[in-house]
Image (spheres, rainbow, N blue to C red):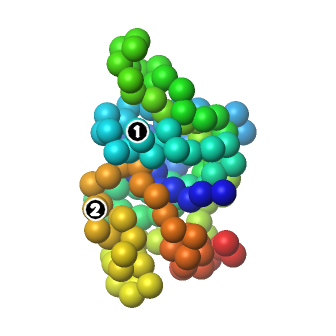
């Protein structure tokens, strides 16, 4: 299993919106960055991810699971080459983990979120996953 981080502006698509999709989940569509798309192409069903609210109060707020592999993005023109995975909500974090606290944690200094905070879909190393889960009040 691999770990990822998915970023969304809460006024565009929030954790509550993800939860509302239910167990079936839905496509993580609308991504128009080649690196982020390539990360989604590398995902497999069962991979886990952090749901991250960007914007005014950036924080990891929940956990998601990949429920369908990369397929053509339904919001993109046909044959455009843009793909997306489908995600379902697993659990909220008891304590959201702010970007400020992530940046302050020495064990997370090499996390992609710290080094390249603009990338909307990014890998997370297992030790980073465990640390952020612990910071958020969840056992990994």
Q: Residue furthest bottom?
A: 106
Position above or below: 49 against 74: below
Query: Which quadrant of the rendered structure holds the N terminus?
Result: bottom right
Compared across the picture, whether 136 is left or right of 99 comes to right
Q: Which mark is residue 104?
A: none
Compared across the picture, whether 130 is left or right of 73 comes to right
Q: Secondary structure at mark 2?
A: loop
- Is 87 or 94 nearer to us in this picture? 87
User: Which residue lies at the image location 27% right of the left edge and 54% below the top edge?
Assistant: 118
User: Which residue lies at the image location 52% right of the left edge and 49% below the top edge?
Assistant: 15
Q: How crowded is the residue under tag 2: few (<14 C-alpha within 10 Å), some, or many (20+)?
A: few
Q: Secondary structure at mark 1?
A: helix
Separation of residues labelled 2 and 1 (CA atoms) = 16 Å
Position above or below: 72 against 110: above
User: Which residue lies at the image location 55% right of the left edge and 76% below the top edge?
Assistant: 127
C-beta proximity under 8 Å, tags 2 and 1: no
> Which image quadrant for residue 140?
bottom right
Position above or below: 129 against 47: below
Q: How crowded is the residue under tag 1: few (<14 C-alpha within 10 Å), some, or many (20+)?
A: many
User: Which residue lies at the image location 45% right of the left edge and 29% below the top edge?
Assistant: 83
Q: Position of residue 124 (x, y in %)?
A: 49, 63
Q: Position of residue 32 (x, y in %)?
A: 31, 34
Q: Earlier in the sequence, mark 2 or mark 1?
A: 1
Res 101 visible: no
- Is 133 or 36 nearer to us in this picture? 36
Q: Which mark is residue 37?
A: 1
Q: Which mark is residue 116?
A: 2
- Is 10 or 86 nearer to us in this picture? 86
Position above or below: 15 against 138: above
Compared across the picture, whether 118 is left or right of 67 comes to left
């Amino acid at each position: 299993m691999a770990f990822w981080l998915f970023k969304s502006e809460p006024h565009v698509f929030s954790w509550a919106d993800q939860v509302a999709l239910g167990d079936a989940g839905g496509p993580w569509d609308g991504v128009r960055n080649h690196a982020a798309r390539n990360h989604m192409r590398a995902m497999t069903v069962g991979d886990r991810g952090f749901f991250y609210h960007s914007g005014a109060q950036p924080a990891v707020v929940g956990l998601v699971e990949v429920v369908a592999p990369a397929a053509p993005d339904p919001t993109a023109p046909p044959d455009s080459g843009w793909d997306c995975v489908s995600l379902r909500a697993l659990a909220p974090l008891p304590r959201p983990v702010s970007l400020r606290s992530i940046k302050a944690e020495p064990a997370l200094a090499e996390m992609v979120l710290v080094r390249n905070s603009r990338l909307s879909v990014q890998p997370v190393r297992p030790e980073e996953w465990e640390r952020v889960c612990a910071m958020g009040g969840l056992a990994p």
